[in-house]
Image: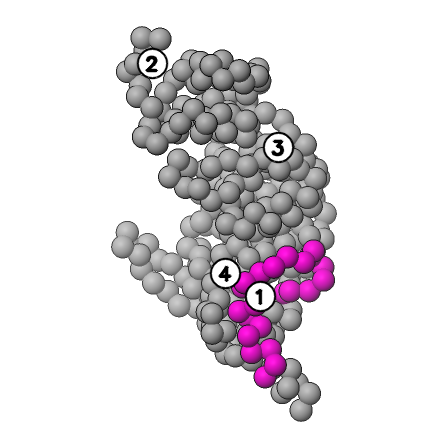
């Protein structure tokens, strides 16, 4: 216990936070730097509150949870949508066989868990971040995502995956649901990425769909380039919505879809004429 006194707990971390991290399946090796105390002190918190310990998790191995480990092996509209979310909002653990997906909209996370036949295991990703994060522990899923381009520290290097044409709308829907920004007035939307290759892939898709689109580049304060792929025009945004928001994915309320469709009446009237 003497050693624990030299490791003060990180500010704002409560016993409840530690218990939530543990119950989410997070290994001790990940918990120690986030919590700021030793693994022995973490165990003491568990004992103090009568939390049942898991031997595999305490040894540093991710705790096993239910998941369809073949999920990313066969293309489907659902799989393409989930891949779009992971490629934008996903995170791959460098050292452990786990992947996670962060989303403000928990309805989307629950839908992903449902599609993947996964336990709905949530955790706070960082002590200062409250956005819900779905955690999936599976070496097979991690490897399959890697084969599809979802790797640790992917933001700068992620490539546009080779998605079959039939499933491109659902994939782009996942990308928009993940990193898309849509103007409330419904005239412009963009997707931001630090990967020039991914940006060019997106632009090619939008051009193939004959949408008014372009790429702009900005330099961050850190001196790194950021690319924005735009779709512009009150007629083009409803067309994009018609393409990507279809019945292939279970319905859920999406403010982004609503913004894209603000000028749908004008768009539909022109089509009729």
Distance from Cα at disc 4 to Cα at disc 1: 10 Å
Rendered view: 208 above or below 169: below
N-terminal of the two: label 4 or label 3?
3
Q: Do the CB atoms of the residues marked 1 and 2 lie less than 8 Å apart?
A: no
Query: Which portion, as a residue range, is magenta?
Result: 244-266
The N terminus lies in which quarter of the figure?
Answer: top left
- In the visual, does 250 lie left or right of 181? right
> Circle 4 sits on which residue?
180
The C terminus lies in which quarter of the figure?
Answer: bottom right
Q: In percent of the image, x 31 and y 8: which residue is there?
A: 2
Distance from Cα at disc 2 to Cα at disc 4: 44 Å
- Secondary element at image label 1: helix
Distance from Cα at disc 3 to Cα at disc 1: 32 Å
Question: Which marked residue is nearer to the observer: mark 2 or mark 3?
Answer: 2
> Circle 3 sits on which residue?
138
N-terminal of the two: label 2 or label 3?
2
> Circle 1 sits on which residue?
257
Q: Is residue 85 magenta?
A: no
Rendered view: 273 above or below 199: below
């Amino acid at each position: 216990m003497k050693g624990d006194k030299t490791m003060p707990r990180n500010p704002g971390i409560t016993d409840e936070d530690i218990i939530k991290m543990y119950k989410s399946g997070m290994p001790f090796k990940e918990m120690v730097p986030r919590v700021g105390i030793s693994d022995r002190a973490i165990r003491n918190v568990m004992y103090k509150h009568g939390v049942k310990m898991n031997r595999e998790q305490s040894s540093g191995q991710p705790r096993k949870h239910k998941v369809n480990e073949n999920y990313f092996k066969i293309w489907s509209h659902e799989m393409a949508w989930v891949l779009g979310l992971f490629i934008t909002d996903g995170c791959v653990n460098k050292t452990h066989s786990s992947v996670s997906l962060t989303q403000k909209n928990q309805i989307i996370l629950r839908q992903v868990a449902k599609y993947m036949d996964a336990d709905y295991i949530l955790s706070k990703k960082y002590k200062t971040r409250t956005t819900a994060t779905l955690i999936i522990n599976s070496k097979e899923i991690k490897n399959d995502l890697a084969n599809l381009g979802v790797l640790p520290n992917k933001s700068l290097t992620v490539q546009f995956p080779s998605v079959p044409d039939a499933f491109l709308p659902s994939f782009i829907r996942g990308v928009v649901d993940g990193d898309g920004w849509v103007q409330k007035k419904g005239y412009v939307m963009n997707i931001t990425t630090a990967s020039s290759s991914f940006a060019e892939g997106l632009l090619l898709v939008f051009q193939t769909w004959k949408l008014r689109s372009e790429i702009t580049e900005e330099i961050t304060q850190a001196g790194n380039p950021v690319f924005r792929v735009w779709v512009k025009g009150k007629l083009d945004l409803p067309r994009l919505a018609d393409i990507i928001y279809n019945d292939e994915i279970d319905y859920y309320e999406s403010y982004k879809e609503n913004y894209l469709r603000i000028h749908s009446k004008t768009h539909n009237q022109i089509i009729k004429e």
